[in-house]
Image (tube, helix red, strand yellow):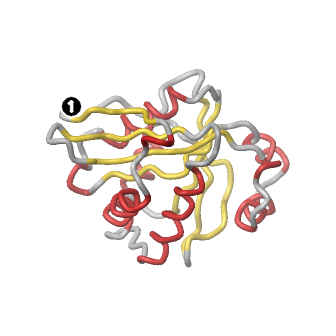
Amino acid sequence: MDYDIEQLAAADAPDKATFGRIYERAFTPPPLGHDPATATVFTQLYEQALEHPNVIVCVARHRDGGLAGLCYGYPWHWSERTDAWSQDLRSRLDDSAIAHLEGAFAVVTLGVDPDHQGHGVGSTLLQSTLDTSACSRAWLLTEQVDSPALRLYRAGGWTELGFGPPAGDRPTLVLTHDTSTSNATNSR
């Protein structure tokens, strides 16, 4: 692979402008088609997440030094999640799903620049991030639309736990994975 994967401390993580560029490049093309306002929201969430004491940020750099992708997340604890979105998520899940997410690693964003997709960057970033976490379970939210991300997760053995808050007019899936018994993604 022509990429180096690095785990970075929050202080060394890409700044919000760099994250915003990766997010826009990864999420605005079809089939997702996110608008710039969504990129702004996720950039703000990223900036806030860098203050989380257990945030994990992994980046992929191409051999030319350019940033090819980024994955970040942190352990999920309902007691820390008092915002409206988290409460909406909770209201959509049954009690067993709520309990399953407690203490699991929340993959907040996995984004790969389209110029670098199809080379195993996403799966390697995701696996590196999960390997770095000390959590035995992971979860993420993805749009219920045929996309490279959803295909990656399904191929990696992620399973549906329920539905999350919609992304615009699209339903979302809450996917989960037991990180203690198998790889989170296929090797490529």
> What residue type is disc 1 on?
Met
Asked whether 31 or 86 is in front, the reply is 86
Nearer to us in this view, 147 or 70: 70
Image-quadrant location for residue 136? top right
The residue sitting at 16% across, 37% down in the picture is: 63
Give above or below for 71 relative to 35.
above
Q: Residue furthest front?
A: 11
Query: How far across and down, in percent of the image, does residue 119 sit?
Result: 23, 41
Does 155 sit left or right of 96 as displayed? left
Q: Under tag 1, what secondary structure?
A: loop
Question: Residue 33, image x and y in percent?
Answer: 39, 73
User: Is residue 80 shown left or right of residue 143?
Assistant: right
Mark 1 neighbour density, 10 Å: few (under 14) some (14–19) many (20 or more) = few
- Residue wearing tag 1: 1
Q: Is residue 35 above or below residue 52?
A: below
For the residue pair 15 and 62, the one nearer the viewer reads as 15
Image spot of residue 170 (x, y percent): 54, 72
Quarter of the figure that contains the N terminus: top left
Say whether residue 146 is left or right of residue 79. left
**Position of residue 75 measured from the top left corner of the image (x, y, whole percent):** 66, 39
Classify residue 58 by image quadrant: top left
| Residue sitting at the far top | 181
